Image (cartoon, helix red, strand yellow):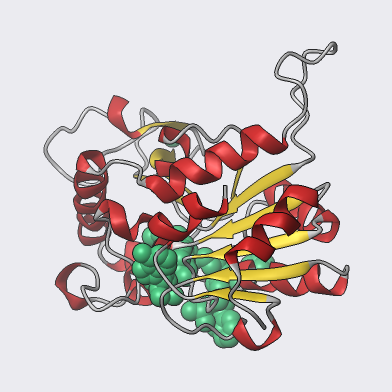
Amino acid sequence: MNNSIAELRDALRQASSIAALTGAGISAESGVPTFRGPNGLWRNYSPEKLATPQAFAENPRLVWEWYDWRRGIIRKAQPNAGHVAIAELERRKSGAADPPDGLPDHSGFTLITQNVDGLHDRAGSQNILKLHGDLWIVQCTGCGATELNEEVPLQGDLPPRCRCGAWLRPAVVWFGEPLPAEVWGRAVEASGRAKVFLVIGTSAAVYPAAGLAEVARRAGSRLAIVNPEPTPLDQVADWVLRGPSGELLPRLL
Ligand code: BV8
Ligand code: ZN
């Protein structure tokens, strides 16, 4: 295990394909609270309690307000240098900007995120595998229609209702719900192909997302952790960079 930025930078430069798994920690320096961090989340409910279909069924208004409260914080937040560095890494590792077939070649770098805050999009990342959905999109619990949260007319009662009459919910994956199959398949494929697998700002406690590091390692990838705190993956990592991603990621470019 080593903490050499220079060595990791070289490995990233030489790698024909890289994957990065990010978690709430990459948004911490943007002022977005993490899940299990000291400043915790609203009304000291644990996310495992609120981010579940049961919580929504029992108290849809509370769960909706929790997401509204989070959207309020994220709306005011800006992507930080860590998000920007990831977008730049994607640019450097992607093929020609204007490929002959018009399809940008993203095989060099795949961003896999557990975050639902949309800050990677706003930082300019193009090819994002959102394992746990997107809190800016709402979906109908009845007919399944999805729409952007900003478009939803907030009449009196919460949660708002779809035209079909059923409640709308955040288009995120709650505990106990399956991840979107197509996104998961692409994440496994990218992890199995990565020469270097970056694990940034995640406590690696949530599955199956955290299992992607094992998929990468089994396929021969080298593992790099970026986190101010220890994680369960540290002892199997090739590099452990102990510090904030907003500071360390730009130094990797
Ligand atoms: C499923 C969307 C099956 C919603 C989220 C027992 C053992 C193992 C697994 C389970 C178990 N019991 C249940 C399970 C399965 C469960 C699970 O893993 N539970 C955990 C808690 C044990 N998983 C599921 O339920 C998944 N679904 O398994 O379905 C299935 C299959 C088929 C059919 C039916 C069912 C669904 C999981 C997805 C849940 N949704 N989010 C929302 O956001 O509201 S998870 C939630 O946690 C977020 O997505 C978040 O990203 C994710 C992981 O947390 P982190 O991102 O790691 O954030 P955390 O706060 O934990 O850590 C922050 C890290 O950042 C820390 O390490 C900190 O040191 C670091 N940091 C802080 N500052 C910085 C920093 N790093 C860098 N720079 C900084 N400045
Ligand atoms: Zn509907």
Judge left or right: residue 107 versus residue 157. right
Image height check: is 207 above or below 159?
below
- Outermost residue, right direction? 219
Q: Residue at x 37, y 41 (%)?
A: 166
Q: Quadrant of residue 92?
A: top right
Query: How many numbered markers are drawn?
Result: 0
Out of 31 and 41, give the one closest to the viewer. Answer: 31
Q: Residue at x 20, y 61 (%)?
A: 62
Residue 28 makes an appearance in the image:
yes
Give the x, y percent position of residue 63. 27, 59
Ligand 2 falls in quadrant = top left
Out of 118 and 153, give the one closest to the viewer. Answer: 118
Residue 170 makes an appearance in the image:
no
Judge left or right: residue 26 versus residue 78. right
Give the x, y percent position of residue 245. 44, 60
Image height check: is 45 above or below 7?
below
Out of 94 and 139, give the one closest to the viewer. Answer: 94
Give the x, y percent position of residue 174. 47, 63
Image height check: is 152 above or below 50?
above
Q: Residue at x 48, y 62 (%)?
A: 23
Give the x, y percent position of residue 193. 85, 55
- Outermost residue, left direction? 156
Q: Quadrant of the N terminus?
A: bottom right
Q: Residue at x 76, y 21 (%)?
A: 96
Out of 97 and 9, give the one closest to the viewer. Answer: 9
Judge left or right: residue 43 versus residue 131. left
Judge left or right: residue 115 versus residue 63. right
